[in-house]
Each structure stands twice: as structure tokens, then as C-alpha cells.
Image (cartoon, grey):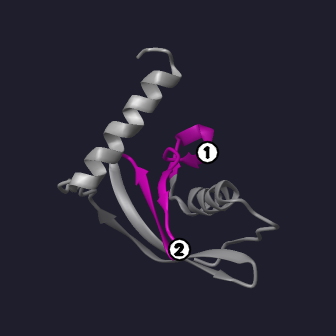
Amino acid sequence: MEMMAKPMNMSQDDKRQALSGLLKAAMPKEDKGSYGPSYCGDPYVRDVYDDHLVFSFKDKTYKVDYESNNGKYALSGKPAEVRQITTYEPVTPSEVEDSEAFAKGFRKALGLD
């Protein structure tokens, strides 16, 4: 896709918004009869990575690549439907101790202990 957004001293949120704007502009139009064409709803950018983003659109989740060149962003390739996979891993004993120490300090700071 050839659409570009030029970042100027952008924060991470600015980058997300610029990519979201490109994504919205690339969405298919829907014929609304006498009201003319309009968007089929707006995509929601869920996550932004160094070379791709993940977005939701019409109850599905997609991944699409983007490029950054000379301070400009461009979507590249076709969106691919994806699914989120969450994993949980065992904590180490030191993580448990750190967590307990944090909780104790937090309760004390709030005057709950």
C-alpha cells in the first residue's frame, strides 16, 4: 500500500496513531445506497511492533507489515488473519520473594499494614 504518514519527532503513541490512520484509509468502503460509500467500521490497532502491527476489524484479528523509510511510514503486504496466544510460565523463587516484598511495601505505603 502506497499511503504514507510522515512522523515529526513522534512519540510511540503518535506512531500508533499515524499507523492507525493509514490502516483506516486502506479499509474497504461499503455501499450505503443513497448515503454514498462509507467505512465498514474502524479498525482498532491492538499492538505495534518494529515491523508489523496487529489490529482488530469486524470481530477478527489481523497482522500487517509496515515499513519506515526516511521518516515516513507505509503499510506493506496484505493483512493476514491471526489469533492471540497467551502463555503462562512458572515463576522462579526469587520472583516470588520480590513479589511478596513489593506487596508488603505497597500495603505499608497505603497504611494497610
Question: Which range of residues does the magenta coloring cover?
Answer: 30-58
**Residue 59 visible within the image:** no
In the image, what residue occupies the spot 51% across and 48% down? 31
Secondary element at tag 2: loop
In the image, what residue occupies the spot 17% across and 55% down? 90
Q: Residue furthest top?
A: 112
Q: Where is mark 1, residue-wise? A: 36
Q: Where is mark 2, residue-wise? A: 50
**Residue 99 visible within the image:** yes
At label 1, the amino acid type is Gly
Image coordinates of residue 66 in percent, x first then y, are 54, 75
At label 2, the amino acid type is Asp
Choose between 13 and 65: the one closer to the eye: 13
Secondary element at tag 1: loop
In the image, what residue occupies the spot 70% across and 57% down? 14
Please state if 63 lies on the left or on the right of 36 as rendered.
Answer: left
